[in-house]
Image (cartoon, grey):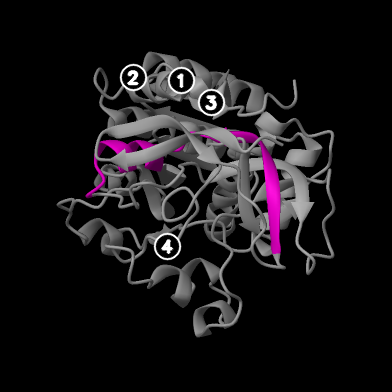
Amino acid sequence: MTDTMPAAVFKGKGRLEIEQRPVPHIQHDDEVILEVGSVGICGSDLHIIDRPEGHPAKPGVIMGHEFAGSVASVGDGVTNLKPGDHVAVDPNPGCGKCRMCVRGYPNACIPLFTNPETSMPGFGRTPGMWWDGGMASFVRMPAHHLHPIADHVPMWQAAMFEPIGVIMNGMSKLNFRVGESAAVLGAGPIGLLFIAMFKTAGASKVIVSDPAARRRQIALACGADVVIDPNEQDVRQRVLDETGQDGTDVSVEAVGWVFPLAVELVRFGGRVLVVGTQVEKVQFSPHSINSKELQIHGVFLMQHAMEASVSILEAGLLPLDRIVTHRLPLEKVHEGLDLVRSGQAAKVVLLPNEFGP
């Protein structure tokens, strides 16, 4: 192991730079050093760089919170992991002791999400945002963040552990049933994972709206039955036409600012899931919620979906080869960010040590 390593460091608004950083070393008995195999570029990474007022982070940290790797070394107190083990990372596991964790809401962990260093409620002390994350050759992590994963899962797929966990959290809230229909607004990585999960779960019809032609093509490859360009078609009317004027059983808002449309698309008694991140206010009349007796659900982080996420990856249930459109070395992180911004990519995964196929 060398003394320094390349790392992608957040320098403040509009600035992400590759620089040499010291290779981390174990400082406490409960820690692990990971050789990073893969790290995904998340939409929140774009928000941090381009609009940090909407998604704060600490300048000077190594970015990347969706990552997996191989254990390089373990602290003296770590008994469940050993060098060579492949692991996926839960960036926000909760303390397990506060009243919210005890109530079953580790994704609302009080110590994690009320830290005075954060400038906005609801943004926890996440690696890659508030302390060094996975956009580097090596990373130091508390062992309780790590979940073993079978060696046959390629590292570029293991980076999808946290996004899949978010999807599973949402699916559990929707209580989706075989034969139901779904509308998905937004065919970014989260939307695409929902499309694939709905079809895996036996959806009768999945209707997708996204303005990017490339993403609509990927949505079809992931199982979408109907794709809509919202710039060219009336999304609500098209969904009604496709569902006998009833609307879909469920809708997923995976954009962040089209919640009113998500409400319009579901039938009487339908369920709406809000997963898109947007801090600005959206004007909306709640009358449709009352008049259609809708169920509205939010989803935030993984919440008890870790084992399911590992199982899905190990079983190869989702078409991740369609969703992960680009695998790039760390030094091409800016190219990856531009691909995501432009809509040319769905999911971009960086390979800091070129692990896996």
In primary-sequence order, the first of circles 2 and 4 is 4
**Label 3 neighbour load within 10 Å: few <14, some 14-19, many 20+:** many
Q: At label 2, which amino acid type do we have? A: Ser
Q: Earlier in the sequence, mark 1 or mark 3?
A: 3
Q: Identify the element where label 1 is drawn.
A: loop
Whether residue 224 is visible, yes or no, is no
Does 238 lie within the magenta span?
A: no
| Image depth: mark 2 or mark 3 in front | 3
Q: Amino acid at mark 4?
A: Gly
Q: Quadrant of residue 213?
A: top left
- Identify the element where label 2 is drawn: helix
Rounded to the nearest whole Å, what is the CA distance between mark 1 and mark 3? 16 Å
Q: Residue furthest bottom?
A: 99
Image marks 2 and 1: residues in contact by CB distance under 8 Å: yes
Q: Which residue is mark 1?
A: 345
The three-letter amino acid code for the residue at tag 1 is: Ala
Q: Nearer the viewer, residue 26 or 117?
A: 26
Q: Which mark is residue 88?
A: none
| The one of 61 and 114 positioned closer to us in this rendering | 61
**Which residue in the structure is indicated by mark 4?**
124
Residues at marks 2 and 3, CA–CA distance in whole angstroms: 19 Å
Q: Which residues are magenta?
A: 31-53
Compute the Cα span from label 2 to label 4: 28 Å
The residue where tag 2 is placed is 342
Nearer the observer, disc 2 or disc 4? 4
